[in-house]
Each structure stands twice: as structure tokens, then as C-alpha cells.
Image (tube, rainbow, N blue to C red):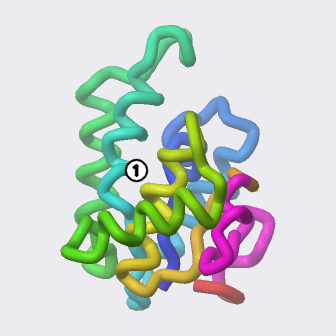
């Protein structure tokens, strides 16, 4: 199974993003395919924070646009939302230590720990900081969806 990081959702949502076309193609491939794919629950909140932020986008997405985008993703029959389970606190601490993930990198550790808890080893992202976590294989937008999904 492959999980999707926030930046991919943002690129697919914001038509002005340089990566928009590739991100949208990837999400369509995942959402319309039969293979299970995942969105870490923390990514949903971060997506809302980023695309509606007035200092990041001019104009930012409206709450209606942002929530509709999430609803569209969640309507895919093959998507799974990864939520913390009983092992999550232990795995989060392991991720912080393994990735030396203090400060802003602690958010990445949350996603890495959640993926680990659910046995997800691949993450579609442009964030190279995930290379800090040895159980995560970064899948780049430039890879062909059929090759890794």
C-alpha cells in the first residue's frame, strides 16, 4: 500500500502549482484504481491548514473548496484513512529518535510512525525529509503510477 503526503494533495488541489498535473494524475490513478491506498489522518488537517492559509496563497482556497477536495478523496472506494492505534505512541517516539526529528520534523515523524503502524512502507511525497525514516520508501511524482501503486 502507498500513502500520500500533504504536499501531493496541495499540488493536486492548487491548479497554479508547478506539480499540479503530475499530482492530479497520481491521485486519479490511486482513487480510480482497485488497489488500496492511504491518507494519514494528520495529512487531512495539514492540507486544510495549508490551502486555506492567507499567507501561503493569494487567494487561499475557501473552506468549502478545501473540504470538498477532502470529501472527493474520501469518496474513493480504495482509500484508507490511517489513524493512530495502540502502538502509535511507541512508534512515534521510535520515529523521532530514528529520524532525529525535532522541531518541524516532528510532524513528519508522526506520519512515518502512522505508516509504520499500518504496515505502509511507501509514501508519495516531494518531501525528502522522509528519507530519515528507514522504513519509508519515498515515491516521487516523476515515477509512473502503474510501476509502484
- Residue picked out by circle 1: 43
Q: Is residue 32 left or right of residue 81?
A: right
Question: Could you say where residue 146 lies in the image, as x and y percent from the top left?
Answer: 65, 86
Tag 1, which secondary structure?
helix
Question: Could you say where residue 95 lies in the image, as x and y percent from the top left?
Answer: 52, 64
Determine if the magenta segment contains residue 144.
yes
Q: Is residue 135 left or right of residue 117?
A: right
Question: Could you say where residue 148 lies in the image, as x and y percent from the top left?
Answer: 65, 86
Q: Is residue 59 left or right of residue 72?
A: right
Q: In the image, what residue occupies the spot 65% across and 30% down?
A: 16
Question: Could you say where residue 103 lies in the image, as x and y percent from the top left?
Answer: 56, 35
The vertical placement of 41 against 63, above or below, is below
Q: In the image, what residue occupies the spot 32% across and 80% down?
A: 78
The vertical placement of 134 against 95, above or below, is below
Q: What residue range appears in magenta? A: 129-145
Determine if the magenta segment contains residue 44.
no
Q: Residue furthest left?
A: 86
Name the quadrant containing residue 24. Answer: bottom right
Q: Residue furthest right?
A: 142
Crowd rating for badge 1 (residues with CA inside 10 Å; few <14, some 14–19, many 20+) = many
- Name the residue nearer the viewer: 44 or 107: 107
Q: Is residue 31 visible?
A: no
The vertical placement of 45 against 98, above or below, is above
Q: In the image, what residue occupies the spot 58% across and 42% down?
A: 102
- Name the residue nearer the viewer: 58 or 85: 85
Amino acid at each position: 500500500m502507498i500513502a500520500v503526503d500533504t504536499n501531493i494533495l496541495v499540488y493536486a488541489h492548487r491548479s497554479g502549482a508547478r506539480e499540479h498535473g503530475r499530482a492530479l494524475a497520481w491521485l486519479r490513478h490511486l482513487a480510480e484504481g482497485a488497489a488500496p491506498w492511504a491518507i494519514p489522518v494528520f495529512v487531512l488537517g495539514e492540507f486544510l491548514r495549508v490551502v486555506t492559509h492567507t499567507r501561503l496563497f493569494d487567494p487561499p482556497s475557501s473552506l468549502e473548496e478545501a473540504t470538498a477536495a477532502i470529501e472527493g478523496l474520501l469518496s474513493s472506494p480504495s482509500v484508507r484513512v490511517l489513524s493512530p492505534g495502540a502502538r502509535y505512541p511507541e512508534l512515534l517516539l521510535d520515529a523521532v529518535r530514528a529520524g532525529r526529528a525535532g522541531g518541524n520534523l516532528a510532524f513528519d515523524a508522526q506520519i512515518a510512525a502512522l505508516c509504520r503502524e499500518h504496515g505502509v512502507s511507501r509514501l508519495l511525497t516531494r518531501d525528502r525529509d522522509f528519507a530519515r525514516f528507514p522504513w519509508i520508501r519515498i515515491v516521487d511524482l516523476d515515477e509512473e503510477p502503474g510501476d509502484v501503486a
